[in-house]
Amino acid sequence: MARSRQKNELRSGYTTGACAAAAAKAALQLLCTGTVPEQVEIPFPDGSRHKFALCRCRREGDGALATVVKDAGDDPDVTNGAEIGVILHWAAQENEGAVSTGSNGASGTVVFAQGPGVGRVTKPGLALPVGEAAINPVPRQMILAALDEVMPPHMRPILEVQVFVENGNILAEKTLNQRLGIIGGLSILGTTGIVRPISAKAWTDTIEASMDVARATGLHEVVLSTGRTSEAAVQKQLHLPEEALVMMGDYLRYALEAAGRHGFTMIHLAAMWAKLVKAALAIPQTHVRNGALEVRDAVRLLGELGLPALEQKAMQEANTARHLYDQLCQQKRYELIGAVAKKAQAQARHWSGLPVQVYLVTAEEGVVVHVPH
């Protein structure tokens, strides 16, 4: 990602989903115009636009192939330098078992297909149903938006978009994909299109600086969130000044202790289910590399909070924490969801020494549990 930056500032990069979207746009341009672009510019979910240089772009039989080499910036990403590509074909009909998105009747349908190096979902509990190619929802949306800039949906016949990653099956061995049930390759990921570099010092310095600013502006309450979705959902309810918002990422215990050191009188803690379960289990650093959440530990916690032994045994088969949450909702065990939130609240109080309000956030519904302090 080309941008001016100060010395020692970490450089951001692009997600696999953004690279796939750029490759898709280039391939469709080739199909429609017969010319090979040197680079393409695509829209991002936040409204910004970014340019990508192409690695390969050529006709592939009656279709077109284009690839982009991923630049993850200064993030230690296993896919940094990987060649992310797309093969496009006009399809006579939708393939059996393929996923259609953006359908406009008989025209405008885009069929997403699994190419080499891209995994397939084989277990429940993920963002995609079992059987689908592991191309996550936001990357699909980015690909559609990029294609729409070349040819509007109402003008397109059925288009097959096969996403592939060179050596993706080998790279996937360095991830947790297989444990999660993503078999055969990598997931095409990203929620913003941008990869923010992971650096413990950078994160903790940012947390400290954010709290310094909040206290300097006279604020006594602070919102600690694990991500932008959680932050936005809670802010819709609280409407606190921007200076009160502190993105703590995975540095749960550090941020809570820092809030205590800075002399705040109230903490609003916003997190999604998996992070909240980790807080309830007293896992201080919630990134998977530092605090992997085992389903058996989460089920043990539910047992301590009142889940009967027979139901514990059944839930041991869950694939992810999200899968556990879905099962609890299906069984209407909302009291257990609330109990987990209260357990997380107690741990947050212990680490911070302050009153804490906990908010459980879901991407689909926003804030679903609010535990008063």
Image (spheres, grey):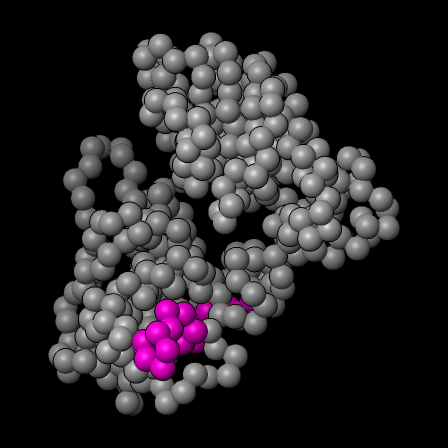
Q: Position of residue 222 (x, y in %)?
A: 44, 20
Q: Residue 248: in sight, yes or no?
A: no
Residue 333 versus residue 237 in the image, above or below: below
Whether residue 133 appears in magenta in the rendering, the answer is no
Which residue is at a point 36% across and 17% down the rendered structure image? 214
Whether residue 111 appears in magenta in the rendering, the answer is yes
Q: Quadrant of the C terminus?
A: top right
Q: Which stretch is magenta?
A: 100-121
Q: Position of residue 209 (x, y in %)?
A: 35, 21
Q: Position of residue 133 (x, y in %)?
A: 49, 70
In depth, the one of 203 and 239 nearer the eye is 239
Specify the farthest residue to the front.
105
Instruction: Place residue 35 in its image quadrant.
Output: bottom left
Which residue is at a point 40% across and 76% down the rendered structure image? 111
Residue 192 versus residue 338 in the image, above or below: below
Q: Position of residue 276 (x, y in %)?
A: 60, 36
In depth, the one of 176 and 131 nearer the eye is 131
Which residue is at a point 30% across and 44% down the rendered structure image? 12
Which residue is at a point 69% across and 41% down the rendered structure image? 334
Left or right of 125 in this view: 248: left
Q: Residue 270: in sight, yes or no?
A: yes
